Amino acid sequence: MKIFIIVVLALVAYSPSAEAGNHCPCCNKWTRFYNRDKPTILGDIELLSDHRKENPGQICAAPEVVHARRITGSHREVVSIAPTYGFVCFNYLQPDGQCEDYKVRYCCSYLYPSCPSGYRWTRYYNRDRPTGTGDYETLSLINKEYPYARVCTDPIAIDVRVTRTNRPYYTSGENVCLVPNLGFTCVDAQQTDKQCQDYKIRFCCPNNH
């Protein structure tokens, strides 16, 4: 299994300034950091499958981002990282023949949104079609275009669905960004086929709004 991982994951150069978490403003629901392995004979192996086995129920079904953070050392290293697999650093790929120690966490935001007691879901909005540069269902634009049915300014959750299928956004497999108090965006240029699907969105707002 460990030999296979190095084949399917992209090799990247890791440095502290390139940490994934520093470039992921669209996630606000991280797991805790996990550090199950120390850099021994092979290297530092932080696999998602191992983290799930050792921490049952703590990691979502489909992490969107994995964030690796170095615990020791300061120089650049060649590592493999992907949210569906986790993180690996092999000693033999490093100039000095030794990996540093890393810890990782996973982004698990809004896969299964809920609206708690004291709040309510708004209706679904679909202000934009995926033309031009993408599909933009942002809170500011929705409030501007629907002035008589304004969404609250502080929603605590959002529910985004593919308009055609009414299924959750993550079933589309597209690269998207969603944050409750900002809304949802899908940029054509970030998709494999350069074309976003059409999405609709609703917000979880206080009952007294």
Image (cartoon, rainbow, N blue to C red):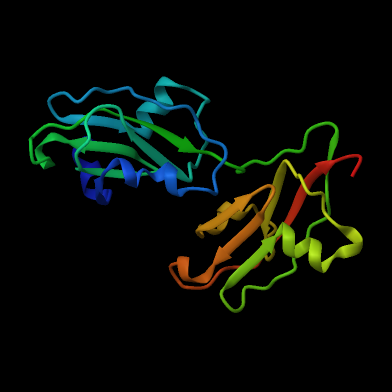
Question: Is 121 on the left-hand or right-hand side of 159?
Answer: right
User: Which residue extends farthest bottom?
Assistant: 132
Q: Position of residue 197 (x, y in %)?
A: 59, 68
Q: Which of the 4 image quadrants contains residue 69?
A: top left
Closest to the observer, 77 or 191: 77
* Residue occupying the point 64% across, 57% down: 184
Indicate whether 195 appears above or below 43. below
Closest to the observer, 167 or 147: 147
Q: Quadrant of the C terminus?
A: top right
Question: Is 8 on the left-hand or right-hand side of 84?
Answer: left
Question: Is 8 on the left-hand or right-hand side of 66?
Answer: left
Indicate whether 68 appears above or below 158. above
Total numbered badges shown on the rendered structure? 0
Closest to the observer, 200 or 12: 12
Q: Position of residue 27 (x, y in %)?
A: 54, 44
Indicate whether 17 appears above or below 202. above
* Residue occupying the point 17% across, 32% down: 99
Indicate whether 166 appears above or below 53. below
Closest to the observer, 163 or 136: 136
Question: Is 119 on the left-hand or right-hand side of 127?
Answer: right
